[in-house]
Amino acid sequence: MTLTALAERPSPRKPITADQLDLKLPDELIVAGVERIRECIQCGTCTASCPSGRRTAYRTRLLMRKTLLGLKDDLLKSLDLWLCTTCYTCYERCPRKISTVDTIITLRNMASAKGFMIPRHKEISKQLIEKGHLVPINEANIKRRAELGLSELPPTVHSHPEALNEVKKLLQLTGFTKLVEG
Amino acid sequence: MSTLRYAFFLGCIMPNRYPGLESSIRRVFKELGIELVDMKGASCCPAPGVARSFSFDAWLTLAARNLSIAEEMGLDVVTGCNGCYATLREVSHEYHAKERIREKVNSYLSQIGRSFNGKIQAKHVLEVLYFDIGVENLKKFIKKQLNLRAVVHYGCHLIKPSNKRPWMESVERPRFFDELVEVTGAKSVDVKDKYMCCGAGGGVRSGVIDVALDITREKIENAYASKADCIVNACSFCHLQFDLGQVEINKARNTSYSMPIIYYTQLLGLAMGFSPKELGLHQNFISVEPLLKKIGTA
Ligand code: SF4
Ligand code: SF4
């Protein structure tokens, strides 16, 4: 699944047609907890605060506008959705107190459910499923731990196989495993 | 005074990539009389950027499982990673705020024979040092004043979202971490975009690394412009992004950045008289020798 830059699609020169709009999208976000989403006044404070937007074509305000318009397909397929570092600067500064980050997280959940995930994100998620750690231990760090007088394996799931089974079961029950492994 | 005891939540990056940070927290806390008890069988928090972005339910449930381990121990949790802090705190918040979240969490957890009842809190290492010990008290443990110029990097999730954080300070210009750093004798320097993100969060490091590293590059440039000797951080992920990140930037852009990166309890540990080795400072990718030379510990 290839993701494309949000700013490129649809072309600003092409008119948006009704069939591109999913008018239920704002309500889906409200149900997910972004109660104030319709309060957005498109002031652009979010964009002006954004460390990612400072160096890419990603625009938080544009994402908010597209969400309110219901350009769901376009949003979920866009790579720009994945450029937010969740730094919460826009969230803190939004004059309408809109949960911008929760908007982004909710859209990302929708995108993931449809299979729009960055391949590298799937890879690291597999580590979580197999090892219970997104970043598991390796040989070099077993040595580094020993050098510091720490246990070679940390006292986490790495040292407790029965605990790892609990994690695996929860990842299955919540649908995470299916999401990643298909 | 009753002794301070916490369940120590490690996460992934601290124990599995930068064990020096773990070592420094364990040693410094012991010296301060804070007991850390291991959380047997804890997992990834899981990360608030990546895991939460893919599946809110998986993120919520795994975090609640981690919290349930500490609850079983009857202890509040302490973590030294801003990402873990964000996850554990936000999940506690969700749990207390919403009935449907409580039901969801426990319907999943009951299937592995666990439950979470929201009886414990998650705190950050800095929170314990700042509120439980206090800046004035910390001064009594300082054996050596560090003559350093430091960029103090808070990291986003230490302070934001501010309505779910304990600091009671302006989120635009907080001071508590600067105060903690200045206890060691180091000077917290003025620096452009001091409170800007390290670049790693939200799955950007794993997903679109060029963007993550470009944010990091800007932070490093600003640190050089402020004539700093080091960047002090309080998050294993920020630490990795600044330290390993400089190696990655140098490789990708043919630059030669070498700004020393130091985690707060490593800095405090040096001022308390621990050796750089005990604190794992030699395990950074970017050498901290210039900094050790300056303070006369090399
Ligand atoms: S800062 Fe808030 S109100 Fe302004 S454009 Fe962004 S989301 Fe809308
Ligand atoms: S939270 Fe995301 S969208 Fe908002 S300013 Fe930070 S990186 Fe940009």
Image: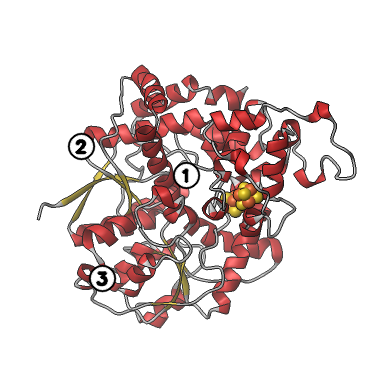
Mark 2 crowdedness (10 Å alpha carbons): few <14, some 14-19, many ≥20:
some
Does the Cβ of the disc 1 residue fall within 8 Å of ligand 2? no
Q: CA distance from mark 2 to mark 3?
A: 30 Å
The residue beneath circle 2 is B74
Q: Position of residue B68 (x, y in %)?
A: 30, 32
**Residue B164 shows in this picture:** yes
The quadrant of the rendering that contains the C terminus of chain B is bottom left
Picture quarter with the N terminus of chain B: bottom left
Give left or right: position of A154 versus B247: left
Q: Kindly check if marks 2 and 3 are in contact, taking CB atoms under 8 A apart as contact.
A: no
Does A116 sit above or below residue B239? above
Q: The disc numbered 1 marks a residue on which chain?
A: A
Q: Is mark 3 within 8 Å of ligand 2?
A: no
Q: Nearer the viewer, residue B244 or A56?
A: A56
Q: Quadrant of residue B255?
A: bottom right
Picture layout, residue A95 above or below residue B110 = below
Q: Which of the pair B211/B252 is nearer the observer?
A: B211
Query: Which mark's residue is nearer the viewer, 1 or 2?
Result: 2
Chain letter belonging to callout 3: B
Badge 3 is on which residue? B272
Displayed quadrant of residue B112: top left
Q: Residues within 10 Å of mark 1 (few under 14, many from 20)?
A: few
Chain name for mark 2: B
In the image, residue A111 above or below residue B167: above
Disc on res. A138: 1
Label 1: element kind: loop
In this view, the mark in front (1 or 3): 3
| Residue B234 image point, x, y percent | 41, 59
